[in-house]
Image (cartoon, helix red, strand yellow):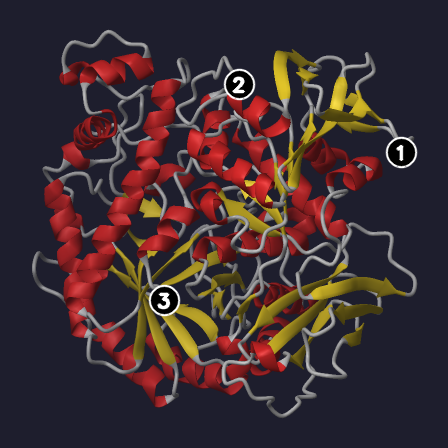
């Protein structure tokens, strides 16, 4: 279903006397869902004695209003009786500091951050809490979903970003077991790490950035380990309530991070692993608090990455900023009606199935006070709550509920190992995040629909309809990835890559033969050359197009005879080349162009970045164009497509603050007769969707249905 509503209860707030009236008001706004926190230390205050009375009353009141309930389980608010004698399971930094139980910005009842689940005893306690709670509500029809992990990450890391965790004895032991499974023998580990161990007990996780190969494994282990923890939580919930769906929601896309700083290695978040373990996936979003002046654009990008991680599973905005954020004495800027409206349209355009706000009432105390309230201090409506209600009523319905993303033909490649490699080299995750963001921004500014493509799914590129793929900062490539990319090109795809593709393997080891560069692009690596002190790197196109610039480094390379040089560096070395292979072609750009574009928005760089993308973006479209004057702004109107077997859902969204009109033309035969061309007039900061009948051959029943003229 399309879920619209709000997070409401985080014990002990709000006050009990407000519960009934607030839930009635949610229903009056048009909401259909409320989310409630189940914090462990408020429910199991003594070992084995569970008190669900607060939740029971709230679930009953929600049911009276016809609201469905999502229960968010919070083991990170651990009961105080658990702490004594468990020093060995406390999260431990590389310096040996133990993180004891305390309060946190999002944990009024304290007990944060809980204990490390690598200790089997702690794992069993958490499983018991989850299974007991889910069993309690297994037959309750009002409880619709269990969210078993709120923003999964290595829990203390949001407060310990300068540290590396966790080095408790149980995590070290689990790491050694993971290494045994990965490498098989100590001799193989020695070979891969360049070590001389004689016993597995000598193997320790690295505590600083140095040799890189061990830190690569330490971070990749933790990404895998948290996925294992999530799998344990899901299994416990399913034992308690086998017929209820289970979800989790990440704090953000770790590939880019809220502030375009990444988060894959530092906070240990991997949406592409987590999404595989649950029935429903989601994300938080606090755009005006965390994403800066371009929050509308960056929120869309984050949401489209989460959509790709979810793939065929439903996803939605499980938390969306409802009021001011928490920075500063009295919080940050409060969202407007415009913000709420555009964030909702972003979610729909990415294929999301609704929005829940964080949160309904303002926080009464602590560092989050007086922030986040969707309604006023007395529970009265605000422009935010009224906009949220309007979106709930208009952006729902059976067609939108059933519709799935139509996959664009242009793709941006996402590499787990390339980002981890950047982290392992002086903790520079932001370089990779900015490169991914730069190519997305270049396409967005030209209204070109794109999708994200993760390395985990590289084997399906051509089969999923991809035709052009851009590789930002592809420092690390495995043999499997190189083979998959080569097949994509030979099948007819256009591959565009920045400098140093596959310079390192997936373990962070230098590929001295640089086979990826030769096989994919017909080039021989000469050397790495930097411009860290001489500024951007000029690229001169051979067709006379404007000069553009790369960032930080250039790759000196020699082409084979079959390679065509499209642009050169100032000294005449190739800067952009094209290599025909099979039915397709591979374009190489010898610097980090997308990261430079993120910094400068240089028009010439943006044109080169998107030169090989298909501007209409979808196989079923022939044209997307903007009619009339265009605003000189970093924000643009855009088009996205969803589909059911019977209909296209054509979504036009206007991120600008002036009226505009978009023309969208379908290819011949892709729609019912007379529905090929649409001109959508868009008011400022708003969107519309049109239901377009697909041609009869695309229909599930093979019959032409009744033509729909619905527009919103």
Q: Which residue is mark 1?
A: 545
Name the mark nearer the viewer: 1 or 3: 1
Residue corresponding to mark 3: 13
Residue drawn where x is 40% and y is 79% of the image: 18
Mark 3 falls on what kind of element?
loop
* Mark 2 lies on residue: 514
Identify the residue at image location x=21%, y=52%: 232
Using the numbered discs, state the Cα–Cα distance from disc 1 to disc 3 in whole angstroms: 61 Å
Q: Nearer the viewer, mark 3 or mark 2?
A: 2
- As drawn, the residue found furthest toward the top would be 196
Q: Report if residue 130 is visible in the image.
A: no
Q: Which residue lies at the image location 54% right of the left edge and 77% below the top edge?
A: 400
Question: Is residue 280 shown left or right of residue 300?
Answer: left
Which mark sits nearer the N-terminus, 1 or 3? 3
Which residue is situated farthest in the bottom direction here?
706
**View extreme (left): residue:** 48
Residue drawn at 70 percent across, 24 percent down: 562
Q: Going from the N terminus, do you reach mark 2 or mark 1 first?
A: 2
């Amino acid at each position: 279903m399309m879920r619209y509503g709000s997070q409401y209860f985080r014990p002990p707030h709000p006050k009990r006397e407000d519960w009934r009236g607030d839930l009635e008001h949610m229903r009056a706004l048009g909401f259909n869902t409320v989310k409630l926190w189940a914090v462990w230390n408020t429910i199991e205050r003594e070992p084995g004695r569970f008190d669900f009375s607060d939740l029971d009353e709230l679930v009953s009141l929600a049911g009276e209003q016809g609201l469905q309930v999502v229960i968010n389980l919070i083991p990170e608010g651990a009961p105080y009786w658990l702490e004594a004698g468990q020093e060995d399971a406390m999260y431990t930094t590389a310096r040996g500091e133990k993180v004891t139980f305390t309060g946190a910005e999002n944990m009024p009842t304290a007990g944060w951050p809980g204990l490390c689940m690598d200790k089997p005893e702690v794992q069993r306690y958490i499983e018991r809490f989850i299974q007991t709670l889910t069993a309690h509500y297994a037959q309750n029809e009002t409880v619709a979903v269990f969210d078993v992990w709120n923003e999964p990450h290595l829990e203390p890391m949001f407060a310990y970003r300068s540290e590396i965790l966790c080095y408790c004895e149980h995590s070290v032991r689990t790491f050694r077991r993971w290494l045994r499974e990965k490498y098989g023998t100590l001799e193989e580990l020695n070979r891969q790490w360049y070590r001389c161990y004689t016993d597995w007990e000598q193997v320790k996780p690295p505590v600083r950035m140095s040799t890189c190969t061990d830190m690569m494994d330490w971070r990749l282990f933790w990404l895998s380990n948290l996925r294992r923890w999530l799998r344990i939580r899901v299994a416990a919930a399913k034992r308690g309530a086998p017929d209820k769906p289970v979800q989790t929601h990440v704090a953000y896309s770790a590939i880019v991070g809220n502030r375009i700083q990444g988060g894959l290695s530092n906070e240990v978040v991997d949406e592409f692993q987590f999404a595989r373990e649950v029935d429903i996936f989601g994300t938080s979003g606090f755009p005006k608090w965390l994403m800066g002046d371009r929050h509308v654009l960056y929120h869309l990008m984050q949401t489209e990455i989460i959509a790709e991680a979810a793939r065929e599973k439903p996803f939605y905005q499980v938390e969306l900023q409802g009021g001011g954020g928490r920075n500063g004495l009295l919080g940050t800027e409060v969202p407007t009606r415009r913000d709420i409206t555009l964030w909702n349209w972003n979610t729909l355009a990415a294929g999301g199935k609704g929005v829940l706000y964080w949160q309904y009432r303002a926080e009464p105390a602590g560092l989050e006070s007086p922030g986040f309230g969707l309604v006023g201090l007395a529970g009265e409506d605000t422009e935010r709550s009224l906009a949220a209600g309007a979106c709930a009523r208009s952006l729902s319905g059976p067609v939108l509920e059933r519709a799935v993303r139509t996959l664009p033909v242009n793709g941006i490649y996402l590499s787990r190992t390339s980002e981890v490699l950047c982290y392992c080299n002086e903790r520079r995750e932001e370089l990779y995040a900015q490169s991914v963001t730069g190519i997305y921004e270049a396409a967005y500014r030209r209204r070109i629909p794109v999708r994200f493509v993760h390395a985990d799914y590289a084997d399906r590129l051509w089969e999923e309809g991809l035709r052009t793929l851009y590789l930002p900062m592809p420092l690390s490539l495995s043999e499997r990835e190189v083979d998959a990319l080569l097949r994509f090109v030979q099948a007819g795809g256009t591959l565009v890559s920045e400098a140093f593709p596959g310079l390192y393997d997936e373990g962070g080891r230098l590929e001295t033969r640089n086979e990826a560069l030769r096989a994919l692009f017909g080039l021989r690596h000469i050397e790495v050359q930097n411009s860290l002190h001489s500024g951007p790197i000029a690229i001169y196109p051979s067709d006379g197009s404007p000069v553009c610039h790369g960032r930080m480094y250039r790759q000196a390379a020699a082409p084979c005879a079959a390679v065509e040089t499209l642009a050169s560096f100032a000294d005449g070395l190739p800067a952009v080349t094209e290599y025909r292979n099979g039915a397709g072609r591979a374009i190489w750009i010898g610097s980090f162009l997308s990261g430079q574009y993120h910094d400068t928005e240089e028009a010439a760089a943006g044109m080169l970045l998107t030169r090989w993308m298909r501007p209409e973006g979808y196989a079923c479209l022939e044209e997307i164009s903007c009619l009339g004057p265009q605003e000189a702004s970093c924000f643009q109107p855009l088009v996205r497509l969803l589909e059911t077997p019977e209909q296209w859902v054509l979504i036009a969204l206007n991120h600008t603050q002036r009226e505009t009109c978009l023309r969208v033309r379908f290819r011949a035969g892709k729609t019912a007769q007379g529905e090929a061309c649409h001109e959508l007039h868009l008011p400022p900061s708003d969107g519309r969707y049109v239901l377009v009948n697909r041609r009869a051959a695309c229909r599930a029943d093979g019959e032409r249905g009744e033509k729909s003229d619905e527009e919103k």
